[in-house]
Amino acid sequence: MIPVKHTYPRANEIETFIAAESVSGADAAANAEAGTITVPAGERWLVKAVSVQCVQGATQTPWPRLVIDDGTNTLLTAHSGTAAQAASTTCQHSWAPGQQSLGPSGATTACAAQGPLPDGLILEAGSRISTSTVGLGANTNYGKMWALVHKLPV
């Protein structure tokens, strides 16, 4: 039998696995953008996914864009889906790495739309995740926006 030599990685080569956590913004009032999620002081986040539900009444056709900024400068905008959400629908909008822009599709209360995020998106303290919606109106009502993140060492 040949002995097996085990080599262990040096400290700087060890990959750290950090559990994913969900963070959320405030529940927005009607005719307002989804509540902004801000990376707190002393934290860094690896963003894995973002999701928000939009209930639309009879008149507007909103088309949400996810906006990522560093607190001042816009770093990224990404549409949800390939078209606006139809009037009189409830749609779950989501963004994640590897997703293609699809939708909205589905029935009036079970509609879904998705858009892409860059893989490895790391946000520093003060960075924000928000929406900018084309067609936002009095009958548009967002729920809480949620993000799935890995909180990284600072």
Image (spheres, rainbow, N blue to C red):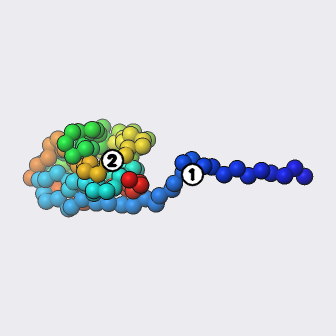
Q: Residues within 10 Å of mark 1 (few under 14, many from 20)?
A: few
Q: Residue furthest left?
A: 138
Task: Report, in whole angstroms, how far the alpha carbon at label 1 lies from the one at label 2.
Answer: 24 Å
User: Which residue does the image show at 17% across and 59% down from the upper left?
Assistant: 28
Q: Is residue 98 above or below residue 2?
A: above
Residue for badge 1 = 11
| Of 100 and 103, the residue lying toward us | 100
| Earlier residue among tags 1 and 2 | 1
Residue 122 placement (x, y as % from top left): 37, 46
Secondary structure at numbered mark 2: strand
Residue 54 placement (x, y as % from top left): 23, 54
Would residue 138 appear left or right of 108 to someone viewing this image?
left
| Of 24 and 3, the residue lying toward us | 3
Q: Residue furthest right?
A: 1
**Residue 145 can be seen in this image:** no
Three-letter amino acid code at the position of disc 2: Leu
Nearer the camera: disc 1 or disc 2? 1
| Of 67 and 102, the residue lying toward us | 67
Would residue 147 appear left or right of 137 to someone viewing this image?
right
**Residue 13 can be seen in this image:** yes
Residue for badge 2 = 123
Three-letter amino acid code at the position of disc 1: Ala
Would residue 141 appear left or right of 15 to someone viewing this image?
left
User: Which residue does the image show at 32% across and 60% down from the upper left?
Assistant: 23
User: Which residue does the image show at 39% across and 50% down from the upper left?
Assistant: 46
Q: Is residue 119 above or below residue 20?
A: above
